[in-house]
């Protein structure tokens, strides 16, 4: 059973600690190998200085051969340690990013929605870009430690030659990190804002794609484009700001590292000229001044990546720590029970009260579309229990006392704008692949002409949001999915608004036949569906004002006749 995450909140620091803790094995091995790599890189100029010193002093071919062999060992160590160290770290990074993507996506897909002020497009960005950037901490820490190892080895080696050279490296590195830590904080705040604006732009695109057809229909596409352009421009300007800060950071780091390397070189040259260090030590110092630029660059860049990872972790925490909209119960409804609406007050609904007996087909003619939407939302358990008054009972149990899984298994509420997914007709009708009534559902929903139209039949490819289907085809596909679920209680909200009158008539008869003996509620103004119902409830001003068969209401109620007759 999937339930909302009720554990303590998971702030950004906890997310980063969790990522580090469960990858400590990979990080230890990665740190060891990357430390060997950096130590080997640093050892190269040290070995070169020793070679120069001993070769000039001994002038022995044996010493030269031994020195060359030592260089070969160092080069081999550098090559293999980098290769395997980065392989371990990148595998752990990729795996950790996958875990957080699944975690964030799982929060978005839980049966009980979370109370988070983010659109689906923003959550998508968090589940992809922010998850990837948070997982980068797995590589950042080992690289930071290995770079520190290189700096320490260089400082010790230079200190052995002359204590002033070692102190110069240590003091210079501390000064560089102090300056860059200020800039890294600015990068973190700027990156956080950029990610938020990019996410809002992505959410706006998703909204526009969803409403593209109606926007074209009433000529609102130009206004929608201007709206997106504004959001996208804001994201662009913030990206430029982040690029400037990153550029300033990189330029400052490079300049300070170059100054330190130059200072080490000049100091070593002065000491050699003064006779305080020998030629071999001078070669070593000059070589280290050049090689130390790379570990210093890595060491100085790591705070920036730490701040970026923290900013992404804070955005993930927005989703992971958000409380559930409602807390579901744990009860299960009795099989074959009634559906009872008892004095429900919510939105436009005012003390709404009616009962649908087990196996009954009831149609609800709502004069106000808002009332129909409010009723469907309450029945679908999309409204928190404390947001409405009264009670909704399924099989004698209150809706708020039932587990989400029990509600979904017992009662299905199919919205009028049911989503169509990328895949095939078959996977849209039966996503789980377990339904035994797919052929009957296809026939009842009059989707047979769509299936027959394509050579692949039910395996015909469907694009995201049903972009290659007409409005009527998408609606019938959604209806087929609801029917194929074969739930004990089925609630349909305007299932035939996009089909022609003849098709609507056939669908109404087919649905009534297929659902015979199963509890069915249809919220509709369709005369065809109203006519096949066992009885019709008239919903006006939030209450049931009339109840009878469709034909009796047509004969006796002028307002009803005016509202539903076509």
Image (tube, rainbow, N blue to C red):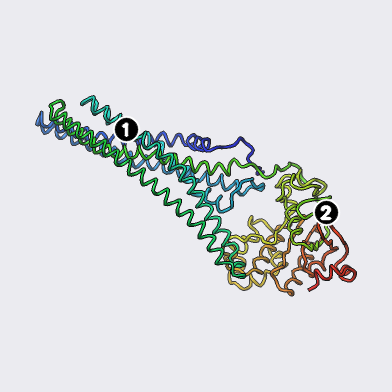
Q: Which mark is residue 320?
A: none
Query: Toward the viewer: 293 or 399?
Result: 293
Residue drawn at x 66%, y 56% as measured from the top left: 434
Is 240 in front, or is 28? Answer: 240
Location of residue 60 (image quadrant): top left
Rate crowding at label 2 as few (under 14), some (14 to 19) or many (20 or more) other CA atoms within 10 Å.
Answer: many
Separation (CA) of disc 2 from disc 1: 73 Å
* Secondary structure under the numbered disc 1 in the rendered image: helix
Query: What is the quadrant of residue 295 in the picture?
Result: top left
Query: Residue 322: horizontal and vertical position, in percent?
Result: 61, 42
Numbered tag placed on residue 173 in the rendering: 1
The residue carrying mark 2 is: 352
The spot of residue 176 in percent (x, y) is: 33, 35
Q: Position of residue 466 (x, y in %)?
A: 60, 64
Q: Position of residue 457 (x, y in %)?
A: 61, 69
Which residue corresponds to the image point at 57% horizontal and 43% vertical from the top-left? 318
Q: Is residue 391 above or below residue 521?
A: above
* Quadrant housing residue 514: bottom right
């Amino acid at each position: 059973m999937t339930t909302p995450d009720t554990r303590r909140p998971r702030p950004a620091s906890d997310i980063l600690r969790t990522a580090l803790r469960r990858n400590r094995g990979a990080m230890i091995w990665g740190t060891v190998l990357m430390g060997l790599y950096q130590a080997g890189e640093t050892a190269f100029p040290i070995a070169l200085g020793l070679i120069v010193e001993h070769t000039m002093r001994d002038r022995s071919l044996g010493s030269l051969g031994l020195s060359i062999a030592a260089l070969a060992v160092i080069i081999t160590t550098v090559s293999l340690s980098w290769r395997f160290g980065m392989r371990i770290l990148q595998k752990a990074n990729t795996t950790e990013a996958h875990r957080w993507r699944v975690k964030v996506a799982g929060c978005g897909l839980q049966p009980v929605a979370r109370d988070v002020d983010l659109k689906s497009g923003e959550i998508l960005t968090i589940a992809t870009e922010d998850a990837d950037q948070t997982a980068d901490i797995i590589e950042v820490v080992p690289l930071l430690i290995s770079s520190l190892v290189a700096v320490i080895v260089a400082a010790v080696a230079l200190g052995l030659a002359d204590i002033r050279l070692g102190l110069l490296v240590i003091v210079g590195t501390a000064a560089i990190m102090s300056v860059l830590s200020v800039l890294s904080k600015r990068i973190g705040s700027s990156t956080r804002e950029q990610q938020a604006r990019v996410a809002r732009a992505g959410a706006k695109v998703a909204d526009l794609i969803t409403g593209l057809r109606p926007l074209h229909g009433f000529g609102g596409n130009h206004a929608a484009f201007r709206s997106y352009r504004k959001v996208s421009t804001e994201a662009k300007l913030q990206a430029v700001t982040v690029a400037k800060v990153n550029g300033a950071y990189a330029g400052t780091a490079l300049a300070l590292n170059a100054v330190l390397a130059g200072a080490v070189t000049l100091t070593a040259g002065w000491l050699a000229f003064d006779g305080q260090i020998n030629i071999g030590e001078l070669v070593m110092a000059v070589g280290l001044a050049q090689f130390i630029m790379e570990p210093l660059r890595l060491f100085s860049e790591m705070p920036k990546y730490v701040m970026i990872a923290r900013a992404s972790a804070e955005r993930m925490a927005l989703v992971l720590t958000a409380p559930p909209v409602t807390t579901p119960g744990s009860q299960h409804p009795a099989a074959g029970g009634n559906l009872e609406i008892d004095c429900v007050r919510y939105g436009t609904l005012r003390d709404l009260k009616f009962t649908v007996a087990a196996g009954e087909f009831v149609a609800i003619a709502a004069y106000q579309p808002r009332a129909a939407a409010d009723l469907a939302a309450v029945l679908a358990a999309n409204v928190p229990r404390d947001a409405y008054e009264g009670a909704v009972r399924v099989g004698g149990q209150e809706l708020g006392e039932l587990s989400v899984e029990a509600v979904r298994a017992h009662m299905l509420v199919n919205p009028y704008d049911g989503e169509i997914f990328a895949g095939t007709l078959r996977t849209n009708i039966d996503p789980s692949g377990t339904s035994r009534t797919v052929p009957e559902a296809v026939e009842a929903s009059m989707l047979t002409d769509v299936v027959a139209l394509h050579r692949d039949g039910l395996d015909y490819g469907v694009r995201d949001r049903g972009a290659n289907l007409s409005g009527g085809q998408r609606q019938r596909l959604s209806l087929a999915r609801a029917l194929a679920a074969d739930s004990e209680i089925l609630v349909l909200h305007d299932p035939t608004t996009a089909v022609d009158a003849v098709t609507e008539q056939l669908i109404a008869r087919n649905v009534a036949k297929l659902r015979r003996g199963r509890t069915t509620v249809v919220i509709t103004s369709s005369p065809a569906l109203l006519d096949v119902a066992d009885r019709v409830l008239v919903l006006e001003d939030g209450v049931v004002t009339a109840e009878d068969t469709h034909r009796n209401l047509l004969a006796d109620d002028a307002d009803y006749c005016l509202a539903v007759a076509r």
